[in-house]
Image (cartoon, helix red, strand yellow):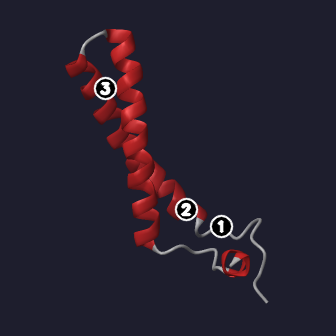
Amino acid sequence: MLDDVVSRSALQARKRAFVKTLCYRLFMILITTVVAWAIVGEVGAALNIGIVTNVVKTGTYYLYERTWDHISWGVSAST
């Protein structure tokens, strides 16, 4: 099983990167909203902060992942 992970191509499928991004961002929306709620004390404002900041971060994270898929530095060549 470990061999499958090690020998996997450095280029991930776009679908995989997209799903990873969404799962991560949903978790981050929850964290950001809870922190914002603790600071501002309003659920509505906290939700707005959590959603807006994370929509922007979702796009940038996806682009970041896709960019690294094209960088071969640090990736062992499969034999």
Compared with 66, 34 (above or below) is above
Reading the image, the residue beneath label 1 is 71
Location of the C terminus (image quadrant): bottom right
Mark toward the start of the polypeptide (2 vs 3): 3
Asked if labels 1 and 2 touch by Cβ distance under 8 angstroms, the answer is: yes
Question: To which quarter of the image does residue 4 belong?
Answer: bottom right
Question: Circle 2 — which element?
Answer: helix
67 left or right, relative to 36: right
User: What is the three-letter code of the residue carrying label 3?
Assistant: Ile
User: What is the three-letter code of the residue carrying label 2?
Assistant: Thr
Using a 10 Å C-alpha cutoff, classify the residue at mark 1 as few (fewer than 14 neighbours), some (14 to 19) or many (20 or more). few
Reading the image, the residue beneath label 3 is 49
Question: To which quarter of the image does residue 32 belong?
Answer: top left
- Label 3 and label 1: CA atoms lie apart by 33 Å
Q: Residue at x 75, y 85 (%)?
A: 78
User: Which of pointers 2 and 3 indicates the residue nearer the eye?
Assistant: 3
User: Which of pointers 3 and 1 indicates the residue nearer the eye?
Assistant: 3
Q: Position of residue 75 (x, y in %)?
A: 74, 70
Reading the image, the residue beneath label 2 is 67
30 left or right, relative to 76: left
75 left or right, relative to 18: right
Q: Position of residue 12 (x, y in %)?
A: 53, 73
- Label 2 and label 1: CA atoms lie apart by 7 Å
Q: Residue furthest front?
A: 1
Q: Residue furthest bottom?
A: 79
